[in-house]
Image: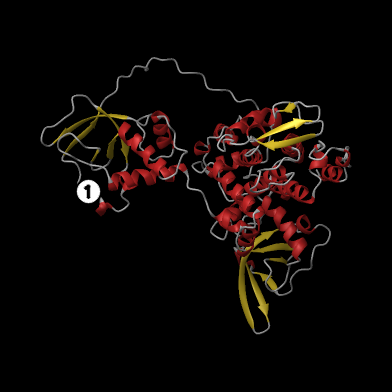
Amino acid sequence: MMKWLKKCFYCSQAASEATLPLGWVASQSACQLLATPLRQSCLYQLRQLTPLPDKLFDDWILTTIHRFAEQVQQLPASKNHHHAGAGGLLDHSLEVTCHAARLRQGYLLPPEADSEEQARQASAWTVAVICAALLHDAGKTATDMQIHQFDGTRWYPWQNPLSQPYRWQFIPGRDYHLHPVACALLVNQVLPTPLLDWLAGYPAVFSSLVYQLAGHGERAGVLAELVQQSDKASVAKDLGGNIKTALAQKPDSLAQQLLTALRALVQGEYRLNNQDCGSDGWLTQDALWLVSKPTADRIRAWLLQHGITSVPENNNRLFDELLAQQVIVANGEKGIWRCKICSEKGWSPDEPLTLLRIAPAVIWQQAESRPPVFAGSVTPAIENQETANVVPTPELVIPDLPVIPAANHPVSTNTVPFMDWLKTHVTVTGAVNSQRAYVHLVEDNVFLVTPGIFKRYMQETTGTTGNEWKLAQKELQAQGLLKHSSEDSYIWTCEVKSPGKTRHLKGFLLPEPQHLFGENVPMNNPWLKLVHEQL
């Protein structure tokens, strides 16, 4: 990879813009476009943050960036807002990709899976985040501007990359909501087929990526959140804002928006438990039952009134979203229940009603704030088993995939983002064996002071100061790089002796310090001594 970077950095321009009429720009190769210090820095960071073998990183990630650069050339990201200068779209896209790859380190994905499954999918989620972030504004070349070639023809992004001088102009009155959807037009031009084949073997990853690339961020989950946060950070940087503040402002997920709307409606507007007709819902001991269609319509109206436009327009899709976000209780594979209502006074509708079932604690977090339960009964109807004899569809067979080192197996340190950052940290700062250092040499091992070293890592890579450092610490423990202090612990104690006092430090032991320092391994810290009773 470094050879590739150097080759690009020293590439000479094939065409001189000085010979072109005013307003025209010479097309460039990817090597030329990526030769700026900012873009080279982004490529280096992505290599450190992507847990792929070098060959796959080159074949997939670098090829994707190479193709993307040739597509967007020196086009701006906006007319008068952020990254409005020549090359702004490429700069912005690479910055967003780096931010997103860093933020991804603080997530265990998919969140509902066990640690073994999260480790198996780790590389796929990271690659999907990179692809989604890089392409998030790619649709602008198709919807926001007109690009004309020197021969008088108009260029479109689904054609071959620009190979002659070009110029652009922004389209007046353009639809600002169209470009997120249009980025799907560039998928086949930018993403290598083997990469898509591999991602297709991880259904949850692949579906999130497809939703994001198709402009349906409301269904892309964490992937959409990472891209949105990273986009805000890049925009803030270009406009002189605070990057850390932008990164800290997590967008409300669709699940939270739906839940907020539902709570506001039930607690503030709904009529519950009427003994005659006219109820919006009924509260029993173990469930809140709401009439499905009016509830969906009112949730949508409430969200639109509050400026939230990402809610699905179709009620069936909205029910699916409520089910996927675990806001409502499933009835088998469906979100709708058919129930018979009967009040204490004897009122009952002629036919079963279609209802949504919700756990009462979802709406009322304090039990004492709930209204009295319904003086009657809500009885789910028994559905006919019309499909009982249907022959099941054979399971989809996933082809063999490239072997990627999983996070729960020992791997070399150059595939671990924390270790890559640590190498840079000790090289640039030289903070080893000093009084306030988090890295020491003890009995020919590297001693990492916890949790200080992990908090520093998260602050420098993501700007976060919360508990995300615990995820980085757990990830390192899962790599098989550390020495056990006991059968079930990696934590070691070091006794620190200094004139007049003795104290203790807790930390991890990393053997073979040459992996971190190369040939220049520092001397052992004479003031630190391991407490060996743990062995």
Q: Amino acid at mark 1?
A: Pro
Residue pictured at 20% horizontal, 44% vertical: 373
Furthest residue toward bottom: 500
Nearest the camera: 158 or 198?
A: 158
Image side of residue 152 versus residue 476, left or right: right
Residue pictured at 41% horizontal, 45% vertical: 306
Image side of residue 90 versus residue 110, left or right: right
In which image quadrant can residue 348 be found?
Answer: top left
Q: Residue 36's spot in the image, x, y percent? A: 80, 48
Quadrant of the frame with the N terminus: top right
- Residue 511 seen anywhere in this rendered image of the structure: no
Nearest the camera: 370 or 140?
A: 140
Nearest the camera: 35 or 61?
A: 35
Quadrant of the frame with the C terminus: bottom right
Q: Residue 212's spot in the image, x, y percent? A: 57, 36
Give the labeled residue for mark 1.
371
